[in-house]
Image: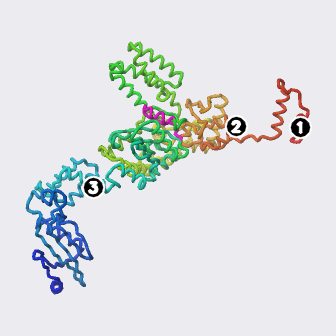
Amino acid sequence: MENIWLEGIRRKLKKVKDARVIQEVIPFSGEETDFMQGYIEKLEEETKSIFRSPVSTHKDYFYFACERSNKASGKSKGEPTKTRANSCKAYVSIKIIKDGCFTGAVVNKMLQHNGHDVCLKEEGVKNRIDPELLTFIEMWLDQGQSISETLLKCVDWAERHGHMDKYNRRYYVTPEDIRLVKKSINALSFPDAKDCISVDKLVTSELQENICYYQPLSENQPLIIVVQTPWQKDVLREHFHTMVFMDATYKAMTAYGYAFYALLLTNSIGRAVPFAYFIVSEESADILALCLEKLAEHNPGFLPRSIMIDRDLKELNALRRVFPTAKILLCWFHVLQAVHRWMVRRDGGNLSVNQRNIVIQAMVSMKSCLTEEEFNSMSARKCEELDTCLGSSHVSTYLKNQWICLGDLWSNFGRTFYHHNSETNNKAERFFLTMKYQFLKGKMNSRIDKLLRLLCGDVQKYYSYLDELTDTGRIKGAKTEETTNAAHCMIAKGLDAKVEMNENGVCLVPPDISTQSHRVDLVMHNCDCKIFQCGSVCKHLIFSKIIAEKQGLVIQDLRAEAARKIVDSESYSADNEDLTVYHFDGSVGIVRRKGTKFCTCIASSYGEVCVLVHNIIYTTSCENISEDPHCSKSSEKKKVTLQHMLTDLHEYIMSPGTLCHQPDHGIHLKYNYTKHNYL
């Protein structure tokens, strides 16, 4: 039956006028694409020909031209060793025919090549790259492999597949071939082959919601890009008054030596999370201040408690201009590193190892000072000792001019507030290492648009996924129900009967798993265990809160009582900007009187209502204090009545020493009348 159908198809076919064309009818079953792919692959293997992808001019018709069918142009003039555009007329056409239960294909093929010779190896240098090999090249490049690494993988691939002809570009590519493939990938991945045009298109279209500010590069202005994704904005909204880590890097991250700034915060479990980035082609205090101002505009209410930086005067001046109430800290590691590098240089005197150790020990002694007076005394004494020991004032002069004048930025007396026990800027350094060796795989990034895509794509996805794992409790240190369950397990073991808690809210928690008891201060929201010191809420703190509630202790009442004791003992100092509170446990809290009021104590850092001393001291400014998100209730403003006004006026008139000591009978009568009516 099939033969009869095939014979009927052949009788209906038009005769081919070109004698070189071979015509045949082939029945098949299955998918059309599978049949055509198998037929072309077999034909290419038999004839050593290579055909291009099919072109369908009308329904069920497919035309496969020789890969060298393009017309020649330019200086090559169609020479097969110079170009693959040889105007070759060889082709294969397939017409799919479906009739009832039969399916077949009418194949016309002209296999005589012209313009090139498929048998000459020398002409194979202009072949197209094998599609399978091309797929692997794109995959390797996408993985961050270099040109040389990709080239070696291509050689291994060709040898494994049994291809030995080095002339054949189809299987043996050159570094330039891989470079062209990489260029074509970039052209498809980014809006434009030129980096500057691509960046401009990205920040104004695809990545527009992730850009806080964009200033394109020109002859008159530097490039400025302030990046913050919506997810990063939500993270910052949860930690408005946290500590900020700010640092810059110049190698590997950005092309052309541009500066890349990262701003990070510490989340509830102690992990550093980036919440904004700056990319600038020029650095100055004005440019950095502009970046910070634009970031603050997009995050109303953002006021960092403190900011950790390296010793960069541009950053220091910009931060002081934009965030005048924030406490700026210098990374202790970079302080020591800068001093050590200076001492080993020629201008530092090329000091010996013993001499350098003496200078470092002097810096460590100054670092440990807890008050400014102690620091001034210690620095003066250490400078005198260095002058005597080293025989000159060269080192002490350097320390005075460069570091002692900034002592409040790196010494302990400038860090008398809760700053997550951070002495260095290592959180920012760790982020840069993650970027360079995990996301960029140790390779130099050559495009700004690629960096923007990375920051708004994989980097955000990575950190948001870590937060999701934290919420589900699948990674260490997660703030989940596990901590609360552990506290209830302590109660189930009967440890609540062994708890010692005094009237001041100090609780001695008996050991659970270990042999060590832990001291919890509910008023100051503090525990001496390692988990809490790392930044996580521990089970001992939750356990103590549960016990306090059972015993009828109200923590906020205890804090209010502690605040009254501090006021009565005058354990505070105030100026026009700050209120410094000296707590009885030795810690210090600072309340900013201007702008958004918040305290730098540990309780406030965890969102707890802290010891609100400022509510007691500044009762007259309670309207402003009531706006404080950390303030649970504000003092009621005393109602001023006419009686109060007349009483004050009468006392003033009747007091001796006033110019109007003689009483005014009219005022006196009004005072008695008003007083009588009110009584």
Residue designated by label 2: 620
Instruction: State the SS at label 2.
Output: helix
Q: Is residue 528 visible?
A: no
Residue 469 in the image: x percent, y percent? 42, 51
Q: Quadrant of the C terminus?
A: top right
Could you tell me which residue is drawn at 25 percent across and 72 percent down? Answer: 56
Q: Is residue 536 left or right of residue 339?
A: right
Q: Earlier in the sequence, mark 1 or mark 2?
A: 2
Q: Residues within 10 Å of mark 2 (few under 14, many from 20)?
A: some
Q: Is residue 110 visible?
A: yes
Q: Is residue 19 left or right of residue 493?
A: left
What residue range appears in magenta? 303-320
Residue 2 in the image: x percent, y percent? 17, 84
Q: Is residue 188 left or right of residue 603?
A: left
Splitting the image into 4 quarters, where does residue 1 fall? Answer: bottom left
Instruction: State the SS at label 1.
Output: helix
Could you tell me which residue is drawn at 89 percent across and 31 percent down? Answer: 664
Between circles 3 and 1, the one closer to the viewer is 3
Above or below: residue 96 compared with residue 412: below
Residue designated by label 3: 184
Between 253 and 511, the one lying in front of the other is 253
Amino acid type at image mark 1: Lys
Q: How is the image coloured?
A: rainbow
Q: Is 365 a magenta residue?
A: no
Residue 530 in the image: x percent, y percent? 46, 37
Residue designated by label 1: 670
Amino acid type at image mark 3: Ser
Amino acid type at image mark 2: Thr
Between circles 2 and 3, the one closer to the viewer is 3
Q: CA distance from mark 2 to mark 3?
A: 69 Å
